[in-house]
Structures are given as structure tokens and as C-alpha cells.
Image (spheres, rainbow, N blue to C red):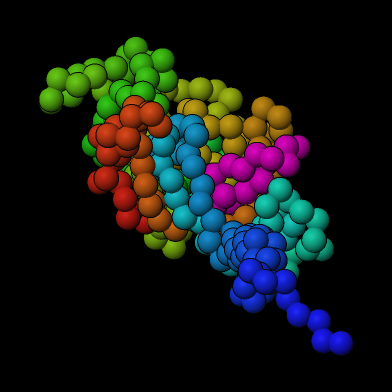
């Protein structure tokens, strides 16, 4: 006896009853593949980084977004999101160059990424004398240049600028005006730094000798940077190279902090479009 389908049950309905499950499975599969691709790119190619503080003024402002390249110095567990312990030691290692701006994982806090400039390499001696940087016993040229003028905005309010440095810009907008200097490292790498006042513990230091496998890092805002001049937890101390996550490459967006997610029209007015595309 031959079985037949009940009348009124189209053949195509029988074939498509499991379609919702299939679509869910395909969606989950796509999301998993996407997550794997993002994980690989984020870990080994490029990552984004947000500037949360003023320690790297004048080059980096609070509210800048950067792309960081991940292959320059090799890979370690700190190359991976959350510092997953999947890479033993450091593979494909390369030593940073003096003057590189790097993102690294801070000591003692596995969830804290920091950005500073490489000043000293293994074996180098580093010292600050009366606010001037000395490297391997030689003074690094420090040339006075035009003041750095920064508008006071939502993410850089007046409380971050001491009263003596507050003023009014040419357009009548409140600004912060800092003394700016140009440093030039051996090899010709130049960059601007800020130096507002003499702070003995920051501007007159002992001689630091960088241990093997470590680097000495400093913020360009010399009077407002917890860096290798200070031992952890007051600063960063020497940073092992395996904690370096990547090299700052380019600014891809910047905001002055005045935007609101609930007011889309402010997303454009808050953007500092002139900063997009700035390299290092």
C-alpha cells in the first residue's frame, strides 16, 4: 500500500518547516566567523585606541581616536584582547626606535592600556636635568617654539588648565596656552613637548639605566605624565617590551566631547575634522 500526503499539505511546506532553525544556525555561524575575523585583525593587524588624558599633549588631545599597528614589535599575550595567555613569551620580536609612540599594557593592571613615547632603549641612560632630557650622557636639544594653544572644551575644561595658562583666543573663545618646545633625538626624530614649570621630582632626576628587554617611556606633556620617571604605582617604571601592543600610526577621528548620543546633529559639530589623518 502506497502512503500519500494528506490533502491540502503542499509539498513545499513540508520542505520549509525547518527554515527558521536553518536561518538561526546560519546567522550564528556568520556572527562567529565575524568575531574570529575581528579577533585576528584586532590582535595581529590593527586596533583602535582612544586618548583619555592629557599626558601626550600637544600631539594627542583628549578625544582623539587612533589606529595602532600590531606587527611592528612582535606579538605576546598582551597583543590579544584581555591579555589572553595564548602566546608564550614574545614571538617575531623587534626593538622599538627612539621616538616611536607606542601603546602598551600598564604594569599591575591587566585592563589598562597606556600610550607614551619611547625615549630609552636597553642599556641607555636617561636623566632629566633642570627640565632638559639627557640621553647617554648627552643633552637632547630643546628648542623653544610657539606656544601651544588649546581651546577649553567639554573634554578639556578649565580645571585641567592651571589659572596662569588660561586666556582668550583670537576668536574670543577661552583657551589654555602652554609653553612648547621641540626635542630632537639622536637619529633626527623630532617632536614637540610641553613644559609649564619646574617640578623637582620630574625635572631633576637620578640617572636611569634601562634594563635588558625593557624600554623607558615618557609622555610629551612632561609636567603631567605618570611615566618611566616614576616607579609603579606612582608611574610606570621600566616597561618590558612584551607589554608593548603596537605603534601609533594615524588619527582617524577626534571629538571635543560636546556631542550627545541622543542628539545626532551634535556628532558633526563636536568633531575636530582637521585632526583626521595626522600621522606620527
201 left or right of 232?
left
- Whether residue 58 appears in this view of the structure is no
- Whether residue 159 appears in this view of the structure is yes
Is 118 included in the stretch rendered in magenta?
A: yes
The mark total stands at 0
Q: Residue at x 41, y 36 (%)?
A: 63
Q: Nearer the viewer, residue 217 or 171?
A: 171
In the image, residue 61 sits, relative to residue 15, either above or below, namely: above
Q: Residue at x 35, y 37 (%)?
A: 255
Q: Nearer the viewer, residue 201 or 115?
A: 115
170 left or right of 50?
left
Q: Residue at x 78, y 63 (%)?
A: 87
Q: Residue at x 31, y 23 (%)?
A: 152
Where does the image place residue 42, in percent across and percent down from the top left?
Answer: 59, 59
In the image, residue 252 sits, relative to residue 91, either above or below, namely: above
13 left or right of 175?
right
Where does the image place residue 75, in percent across and percent down from the top left?
Answer: 68, 64
In the image, residue 56 sits, relative to residue 191, either above or below, namely: above
Tell me where the magenta segment starts and ends, as one range: 102-122
Amino acid at each position: 500500500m502506497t502512503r500519500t500526503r494528506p490533502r491540502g499539505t503542499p509539498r513545499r511546506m513540508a520542505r520549509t518547516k525547518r527554515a527558521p532553525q536553518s536561518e538561526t544556525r546560519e546567522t550564528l555561524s556568520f556572527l562567529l566567523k565575524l568575531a574570529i575575523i575581528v579577533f585576528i585583525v584586532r590582535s595581529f593587524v590593527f586596533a583602535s585606541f582612544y586618548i583619555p588624558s592629557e599626558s601626550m599633549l600637544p600631539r594627542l588631545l583628549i578625544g582623539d581616536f587612533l589606529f595602532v599597528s600590531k606587527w611592528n614589535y612582535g606579538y605576546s599575550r598582551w597583543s590579544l584582547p584581555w591579555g589572553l595567555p595564548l602566546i608564550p613569551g614574545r614571538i617575531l620580536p623587534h626593538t622599538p626606535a627612539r621616538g616611536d609612540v607606542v601603546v602598551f599594557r600598564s604594569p599591575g593592571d591587566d585592563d589598562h592600556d597606556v600610550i607614551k613615547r619611547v625615549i630609552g632603549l636597553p642599556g641607555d641612560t636617561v636623566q632629566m636635568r633642570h627640565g632638559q632630557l639627557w640621553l647617554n650622557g648627552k643633552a637632547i636639544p630643546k628648542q623653544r617654539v610657539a606656544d601651544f594653544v588649546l581651546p577649553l572644551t567639554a573634554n578639556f575644561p578649565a580645571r585641567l588648565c592651571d589659572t596662569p595658562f588660561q586666556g582668550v583666543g583670537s576668536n574670543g573663545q577661552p583657551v589654555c596656552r602652554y609653553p612648547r618646545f621641540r626635542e630632537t633625538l639622536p637619529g633626527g626624530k623630532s617632536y614637540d613637548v610641553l613644559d609649564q614649570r619646574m617640578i623637582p621630582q620630574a625635572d631633576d632626576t637620578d640617572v636611569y639605566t634601562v634594563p635588558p628587554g625593557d624600554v623607558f617611556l615618557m609622555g610629551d606633556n612632561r609636567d603631567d605624565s605618570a611615566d618611566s620617571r616614576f616607579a609603579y604605582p606612582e608611574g610606570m617604571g621600566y616597561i618590558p617590551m612584551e607589554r608593548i601592543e603596537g605603534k601609533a600610526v594615524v588619527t582617524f577621528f577626534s571629538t571635543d566631547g560636546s556631542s550627545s548620543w541622543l542628539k545626532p546633529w551634535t556628532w558633526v559639530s563636536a568633531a575636530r575634522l582637521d585632526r583626521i589623518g595626522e600621522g606620527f
